[in-house]
Amino acid sequence: MLRLSFNTFAERWPLFTGAILTVATGVALVQSSLLILVSAATQDLPPGLDPGAEAQMRDAYEGAVSLLGITLGIAYVLAIFIVSSTFAFTVAQRRRDLALLRLVGGSRGQLRRLLLSEALLLALFGSAIGVPLGILAEEAQSRLLVVLELIPPGFSAQWHDWILAVSFGVGIGVALTGVFAASRRAATVRPLDALRDVGDAARVMTAGRWIVGLLFTGGAVAMAIVSAHAPPEGAIALSANIALVGAIGLSMLSPLLVPLVGRAVGLVLRGTTLGGLAAANLRDAVRRTASTAAPLIVLSGLLIGLTGTLLSISNGIEEEQARDIAGDLVVTSTAEETARIASIPGVAAASAQTPVTVTLIERYPDGEGGEAVEREDTGFLAMDPAAYQQTHTRTPAAGSLDDLHGETVVVERGFNGHEVGDTIEASVAGREVTLRVVAVFDSSLSYDGFLLPRDLVSDEQLAQAPTQTIVRIAAGTDVDAVSMEIRAAGLGEVYTVAESISRAKSAQDDLNWRINAVIMGLSGLYALIAVINSVVIATSERKTEFAVARLSGLSRAQVLRMAFIESWAVATIALLLSGLAAGAALLGIRAAIDRLVGVPIAVVPWTMTAVVVAGSFLVVGAATLCTAAVATRPRPTTLATARE
């Protein structure tokens, strides 16, 4: 079987090139993300750092690990989906060849072994190309993380020899998984049905396609429902994945939409020869249209859904902060300077909030009769509870902030299941203490972390720490005059509450853009390559069809226009279905924000949507025209009887 697979590959290498490319790119993407993830998780911090810089760098690496975990997950799912769809499309394009093999005596088992052997060869070729390509991708991805300030400068991912086994394992695994279902279906189709393209061979919506499509689409709907009741972290994670899961499900169900779009094309271009031919081709080649649209559905759904989710969260945080802050001014300075703000004439209340790093300590049995200790650095806010209540409208769901003094703490609901009265072991400024939970806040989008009383933190630790002070001005006092007085006293930068919230939103939007760039950077490029690859495979295999059309009276230019019309119909199908997937993601985050903030917020990313729509039509149309131009270059008489 391997010799026959080699011969088949040598004979039909243009068809298999796209499959090798998808495997190689998928391997490179997974290898790059995994190497950076492992390196960031095990990175040693430079010696001699002060505690603040050390905590900041550690937080940066922890954030990078979380972000890269999401990137790796999306990359792996994309690799499985794209390689599977590409291999399935490649097998479908060869159904007549496979039928002839059956007619000359090949058994179903031999046919499946042939396809699996081909997939193994393609996986080995693709993985061999993907490993060095992954080194280049790792350098690009690391540089992107540093440039976007999502990982400390000077970071460099370390090479690990075991990544070779992982890369080849990923390549072989996704290739064999991708061709397994296609080989099984090809082996069960009757050879004569495949030759005449009737019966089971002509049926696109197979049982497997129905199951996967409904399972993933139903999963997206379920995640949208669950996200409305999940805590913020869970709601955000679910909403970000709804678009991916929904896009995969809808791509499986896309053949149901192809005939409808074909009729729409026929109606729009009614009376024109090319329009009628394009509409007929769409209705006749449902499998080809659906396979071409699949990667574009996933790419567009991810881009629009993820961007909309992040923008909705940013707007939700802005709305929540506007409701929570009951003040007039926000002063950014150090804790040492904030003590003088309350003495400024006209200041009715001043609540200083200073971020500090506290080490949480968890003890549990190690399984050998001893005790294991786990330490985790966490961000806290040191504040005065009386002043805090005068400048914030938010109140605890349980307990009271009046009890926040001494060795006590306020947590958010859901933190390890802690309730009022529970204790948390921690290390504050090098001193181990047992903190008693005196209040619990409901979950929120903009919650600033755990609250500690200022008297628990030493003056030395607070002195030069960056601090934000919410200032409430006394009734009848001019806000601008107080603002000028604070500036004149050199107590820090002063903003109105609206300005401060707007600045925070701009910073959040910038962070969201950088996160989106990392998550969808190489993954989006991979999906874009898959889109072009699917268009090239679909169009290059139509040489005989184009030749027959030219012999029937069409000019080469007319054939190209016909293919172009079909390509835009394919893009339309993909954009419609990706819009549904992205819409489900926005509905999920809208329900979550409504529960957390009290206002249903869902932001449609119109700029990103316009870019995706225009880019989809441009890329699909250009790839189709270029491939069709190459396919129609030979004289039609030499291709009309050619074997594809």
Image: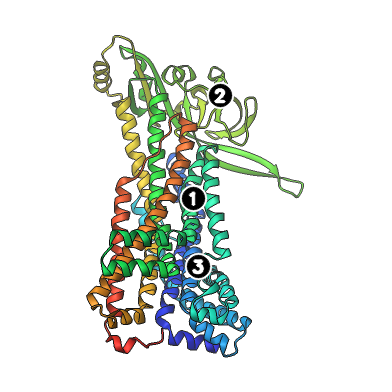
Residue at mark 1: 241
**Of label 2 and label 1, which has the lower sequence position?**
1
Q: Is residue 150 visible?
A: no
Q: CA distance from mark 1 to mark 3?
A: 27 Å
Which residue is at the front of the view, 216 or 98? 98
Q: Position of residue 505 (x, y in %)?
A: 34, 36
Rendering coords of residue 331 (x, y %): 33, 25
Disc assigned to residue 8 = none
Specify which label sits upstream in the sequence, 3 or 2: 3
Query: Is 337 placed above or below 132 here?
Result: above
Element at badge 2?
A: loop
Helix, strand or loop under label 3: loop
Using a 10 Å C-alpha cutoff, classify the residue at mark 1 as few (fewer than 14 neighbours), some (14 to 19) or many (20 or more). Answer: many
* Residue 497 placement, left or right of 57: left
Mark 3 Cα within 10 Å, few/some/many (few <14, many 20+)?
some
- Residue hosting label 2: 397
In depth, the one of 535 and 410 nearer the eye is 535
The residue located at (44%, 18%) in the rendering is: 387
Quarter holding the C terminus is bottom left
Q: Which residue shows up at 43% across the image and 27% down it?
A: 353
Q: With 141 as the anchor, is 239 left or right in this view?
A: right
Label 1 element class:
helix
Residue to which mark 3 is pinned: 204
Quick one: 373 or 137, which is closer to the camera? 137
Amino acid carrying mark 2 in the image: Ala
Q: Is residue 199 visible?
A: yes
Residue at point 24%, 16% (across, down): 481
The answer to whether 502 appears left or right of 9 in the picture is left
Q: Amino acid at mark 3?
A: Val
The mark closer to the camera, 3 or 2, is 3
